[in-house]
């Protein structure tokens, strides 16, 4: 069974940093692209960032470019999201998902970890 | 950026009835369109990818259709567990974008 478990969320002050992790099991992790999606309170789903299976190709939504970095450790079957210079508008539940084959739809999702940016 | 627009925002349906949800793209996404179901406190679930292919384990009462800019998710006979928020997403190009969602509620 494919399982994704996020961790690392919490309360952080504006301008602060957090690193989210997503531990994967039940599938050939290195063969699949991975994605982070967030959902702010009362809002819809928003794509944040994606990374290829080998980690050599990354993509970001404009609002996080230069502040967030997606990475992966295939030996540990873990996906990361380093978030710097956090803003109030980054407050959301962050979920990881594995992507389907060569396409970037989100196949299986984790339940998410909550990030709150507030002073 | 491709803007995805879902309608209606809320759909009130009685159990056993048919529900039809729409998703429109601001430019063609070919068939690179997925649908997701989200219930409170649960992870989103992939229902449909490739505009019309059901994901593993998805009941056949869920069906997707369309290509280009107009897409439809149909739930043929709503069950109690189907009341949720549904999102469409294009993966034709970057950035990936979601629609704003359609909430299917009990009438």
Image (spheres, rainbow, N blue to C red):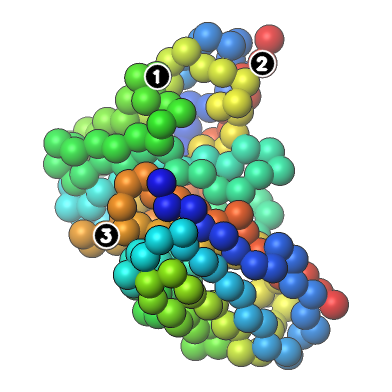
Name the residue tied to disc 1. A67
Query: From what the image shows, is residue A63 above or below residue B45?
Result: above
Q: Is residue A80 visible?
A: no
Q: Mark number for residue A118?
A: 2
Q: Position of residue A11 (x, y in %)?
A: 61, 19
**First in residue order: circle 2 vs circle 1:** 1
SS at circle 1 = loop
Q: Position of residue A34 (x, y in %)?
A: 31, 46
Query: From what the image shows, is residue A112 above or below residue B65?
Result: above
Q: Quadrant of residue B90?
A: bottom left
Quadrant in the picture for the C terminus of chain B = bottom right
Q: Is residue A108 left or right of residue B62?
A: left
Q: CA distance from mark 3 to mark 2?
A: 36 Å
Q: Is residue A33 left or right of residue B29?
A: left
SS at circle 3 = loop
The residue lying toward the viewer, choosing from A9 and B63, is B63
Q: Which label lies toward us, 2 or 1?
A: 1
Q: Chain of mark 3?
A: A
Q: Position of residue A44 (x, y in %)?
A: 61, 48
Q: Chain of mark 2?
A: A
Name the residue tied to disc 3. A103
């Amino acid at each position: 069974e494919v399982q994704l478990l996020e961790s690392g969320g919490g309360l952080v002050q504006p301008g602060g940093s957090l690193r989210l992790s997503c531990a994967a099991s039940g599938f050939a992790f290195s063969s699949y692209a991975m994605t982070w999606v967030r959902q702010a309170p009362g809002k819809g789903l928003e794509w944040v960032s994606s990374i290829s299976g080998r980690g050599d190709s990354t993509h970001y939504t404009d609002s996080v470019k230069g502040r967030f970095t997606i990475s992966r450790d295939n030996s540990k079957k873990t996906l990361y999201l380093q978030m710097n210079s956090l803003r109030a508008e980054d407050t959301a539940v962050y979920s990881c998902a594995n992507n389907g084959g060569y396409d970037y739809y989100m196949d299986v999702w984790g339940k998410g970890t909550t990030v709150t940016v507030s002073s | 950026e491709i803007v995805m627009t879902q309608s209606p925002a809320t759909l009130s349906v009685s159990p056993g009835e048919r529900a039809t949800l729409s998703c429109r793209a601001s430019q063609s996404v070919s068939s690179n369109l997925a649908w997701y179901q989200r219930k409170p406190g649960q992870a989103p679930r992939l229902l449909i990818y490739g505009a019309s292919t059901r994901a593993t384990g998805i009941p056949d009462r869920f069906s997707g259709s369309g290509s280009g800019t107009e897409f439809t998710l149909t739930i043929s006979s709503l069950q109690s567990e189907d009341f949720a928020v549904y999102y469409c997403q294009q993966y034709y190009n970057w950035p990936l974008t979601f629609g704003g969602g359609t909430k299917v509620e009990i009438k």
